[in-house]
């Protein structure tokens, strides 16, 4: 069977956070990579969901058109997924003519089959803005759990699907006024008329496709309550036009058209798209998403396809996660809480370690939490100390003692037992991945790594080589085969790491059939071993936690003053240091030691205005007591002093209206401050530093660090 894989189309109007990434695209990517390695004909499809209220709302906030919003954020999404090495076969978008054609065609089939009805109802209308308010333009109190910031389509606290008219104390999100109810007509999909057929299909699908538990539970709940007609049109301008007289000013509801995007994105890229989407006899559809998307993929979208009467490829397996939260709260871009996709690259932590932790911590049965301390500990102890250690010690030992040559000797009984145990473990791993048990599969790989490390330790080839070198060579050769199997098995989860190991083995093949194989490389010589990853510095975990906690960096800890250098001497104990005397507007000038010899002559420094960190803890530097630090900008070994010529000694650097209440700080505390040069301006976090309202500038270095 061909494998058609989708991940829920992300809304185009935001930046995906770690929870979005593991719930959809990363999980689907791991399975797609496994399928390709197994040799299955595989197509992994995703793209940005671009129509609807969310996009109109973002466009209004940013003062640009919906099309511009889509273009901007589509590129952001593409860049983030590229950074995560997501291996889409197709990554498209829904705001296309192909999407319009296919969505309208499905609608016409549903209408022809008597599954579309028209209802006139009272809908929320803002008299001030003179528009009907779509779901997300209405906010209020949830009638079920009393959450005060529920949206008109869904409550984020209890998860209930809502209509704007259900909300208590409703407000227009655009202007804040209370909306009124006004009569309007909309088209509805009569789900009740297709419930029996849908229920039969769903039962067969979850039994044969082994749906995740929450998907089965949610679908049963919807069916047991009885399916009601649901609106599929809205009073918006940004969306797919409704091909029906009288509906020229309305568009399809994004909930109706978004899942159709899987089909249109494929059709726009592949001429043979029907071989995938209208070929259920040869294709199995696997869909990945978080739990909030379940009803649209197990009820509304399948009902729409069944209702057309055509031979669509229907959902075989749904893999729906719970939520990944951040530390002790939720991700929020607006208040800078949590790690978002565009933050990951900036941390400097290799992306494969992010992939490892997210997949190992995947919220499969319960909500889980991203925690910085746990992230660092699990990466170091479960992967680097385990897999990293096994790879390094095995390859280094083979290289050092046997010139890197693998030999297929006749095996002793203990070697045969180890091989048989490994073969069983990899067979079980294959079964787990076929069943799309991703977190369990990664845990199984880690367990195999521990087994390899134990075998290495128990066999002690460093001792055995003295009395039975063939036995020692056989042991380490088997461990190299194990390393190859682990490299292949890791590829769905950590593709860069897998490739790195395979390159060290001087090999190139990553086919899944090699997992559990312990022969075929007799006489092969491996390449040069390298350390996979250095351990993450545990001290950085707290720094990252603070950085992404939403806590605003406190400029008030820094006392930065303009100062004038009034004397320059070479340091008597160092040819790299100056001994400066600097007037910063105090009763007496300060002595400051500065490493500027290689960048400025004494003549260039004399009488120059500089910025001084005045509340730095005094330090003894090569026998001279330094009472502060002169700030410099640096990039790639180039250095520049900020231009302070317009200022006077003692004038204080300010950031916005933040108050300065300095006490003595250490050099480590200063290094943690988010000071940098950006576009020629001295910046603290995202705000410019000023003196008397004028920006502090550089002229040569336009971007760089400040130290």
Image (cartoon, grey):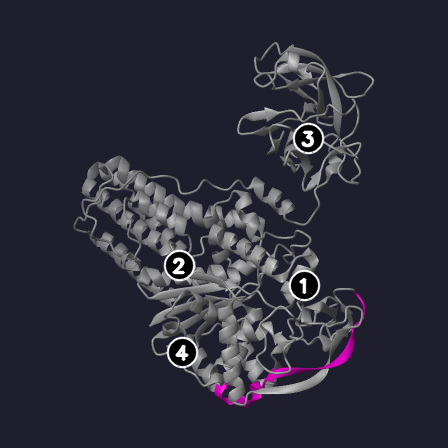
Q: Compared to 348, does 243 lie above or below?
A: below
Q: Nearer the viewer, residue 338 or 235?
A: 235
Counting from the top left corner in percent of width and height, residue 614 is at: 74, 26
Element type where label 2 sits in the image = helix
Q: Earlier in the sequence, mark 4 or mark 3?
A: 4
| Residue at mark 1 | 57
Q: Earlier in the sequence, mark 1 or mark 3?
A: 1
- Tell me the number on the disc at residue 208: 4
- Tell me the number on the disc at residue 697: 3
- Tell me the number on the disc at residue 444: 2
Q: Nearer the viewer, residue 34 or 7?
A: 7
Counting from the top left corner in percent of width and height, residue 562 is at: 75, 25
Which region shows up in magenta?
176-199
Determine whether, in the image, residue 678 is placed left or right of residue 637. Answer: right
Element type where label 4 sits in the image = helix
Separation of disc 2 and disc 4 at Cα?
Answer: 24 Å
Residue 158 part of the magenta segment: no
């Amino acid at each position: 069977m061909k494998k058609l894989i989708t991940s829920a189309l992300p809304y185009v109007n935001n930046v995906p956070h770690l929870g979005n990434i593991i719930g959809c695209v990363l999980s689907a990517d791991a399975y797609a990579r496994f399928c390709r390695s197994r040799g299955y004909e595989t197509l992994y499809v995703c793209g940005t969901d671009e129509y609807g209220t969310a996009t109109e709302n973002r466009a209004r906030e940013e003062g640009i058109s919906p099309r511009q919003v889509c273009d901007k954020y589509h590129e952001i999404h593409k860049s983030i997924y590229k950074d995560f090495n997501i291996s889409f076969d197709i990554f498209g978008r829904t705001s296309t003519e192909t999407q319009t054609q296919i969505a309208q065609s499905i609608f016409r089939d549903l209408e022809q089959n008597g599954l579309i009805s028209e209802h006139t109802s009272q809908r929320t209308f803002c008299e001030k803005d003179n528009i009907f308010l779509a779901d997300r333009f209405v906010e209020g109190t949830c009638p079920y759990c009393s959450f005060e910031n529920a949206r008109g389509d869904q409550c984020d606290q209890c998860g209930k699907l809502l209509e704007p008219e259900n909300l208590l104390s409703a407000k227009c999100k655009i202007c804040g006024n209370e909306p009124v109810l006004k009569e309007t007509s909309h088209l509805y999909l009569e789900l009740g008329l297709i419930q029996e057929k849908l229920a039969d299909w769903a039962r067969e699908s979850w039994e044969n496709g082994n749906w995740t538990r929450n998907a089965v539970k949610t679908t049963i709940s919807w069916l047991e309550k009885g399916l009601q007609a649901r609106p599929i049109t809205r009073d918006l301008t940004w969306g797919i036009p409704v091909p029906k007289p009288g509906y020229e000013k309305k568009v399809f509801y994004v909930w109706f058209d978004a899942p159709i995007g899987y089909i249109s994105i494929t059709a726009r890229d592949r001429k043979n798209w029907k071989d995938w989407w209208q070929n259920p006899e040869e294709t199995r559809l696997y869909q990945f998403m978080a739990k909030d998307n379940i009803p649209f993929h197990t009820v509304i979208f399948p009902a729409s396809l069944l209702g057309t009467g055509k031979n669509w490829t229907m959902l075989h397996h749904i893999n729906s996660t719970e939520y990944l939260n951040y530390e002790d709260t939720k991700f929020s871009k607006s208040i800078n809480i949590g790690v978002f996709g565009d933050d990951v690259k900036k941390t400097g932590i290799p992306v494969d370690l992010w992939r490892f932790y997210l997949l190992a911590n995947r919220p499969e049965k319960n909500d889980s939490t991203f925690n910085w301390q746990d992230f660092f500990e699990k990466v170091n102890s479960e992967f680097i100390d385990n897999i990293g250690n096994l790879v390094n010690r095995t390859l280094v030992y083979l290289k050092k003692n046997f010139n890197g040559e693998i030999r297929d000797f006749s095996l002793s009984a203990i070697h045969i037992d180890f091989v048989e145990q490994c073969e069983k473990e990899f067979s079980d791993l294959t079964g787990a991945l076929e069943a799309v048990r991703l977190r369990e599969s990664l845990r199984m790989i880690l367990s195999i790594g521990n087994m390899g490390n134990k075998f290495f330790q128990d066999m002690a080839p460093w001792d055995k080589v003295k009395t039975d070198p063939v036995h020692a060579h056989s042991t380490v050769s088997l461990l190299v085969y194990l390393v190859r199997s682990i490299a292949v098995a890791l590829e769905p989860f950590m593709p860069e790491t897998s490739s790195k190991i395979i390159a060290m083995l001087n090999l190139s093949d990553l086919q899944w059939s090699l997992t559990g194989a312990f022969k075929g490389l007799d006489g092969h010589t491996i390449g040069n071993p390298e350390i996979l990853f250095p351990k993450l510095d545990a001290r950085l975990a707290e720094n990252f936690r603070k950085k992404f906690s939403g806590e605003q960096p406190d400029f008030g800890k820094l006392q930065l003053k303009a100062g004038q250098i009034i004397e320059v001497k070479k340091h008597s104990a160092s040819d790299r240091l100056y001994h400066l005397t600097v007037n910063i507007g105090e009763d007496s000038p300060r002595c400051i030691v500065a490493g500027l010899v290689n960048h400025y002559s004494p003549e260039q420094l004399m009488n120059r205005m500089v910025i001084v960190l005045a509340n730095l803890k005094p330090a003894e530097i090569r026998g001279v007591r330094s009472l502060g630090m002169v700030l410099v900008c640096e990039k790639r070994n180039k250095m520049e002093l900020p231009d302070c010529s317009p200022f006077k000694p003692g004038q204080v650097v300010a950031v916005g209206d933040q108050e300065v209440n300095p006490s003595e700080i250490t050099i480590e505390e200063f290094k943690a401050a988010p000071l940098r040069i950006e576009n020629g301006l001295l910046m603290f976090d995202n705000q410019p530093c000023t003196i008397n309202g004028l920006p502090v500038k550089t002229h040569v270095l336009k971007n760089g660090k400040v130290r």
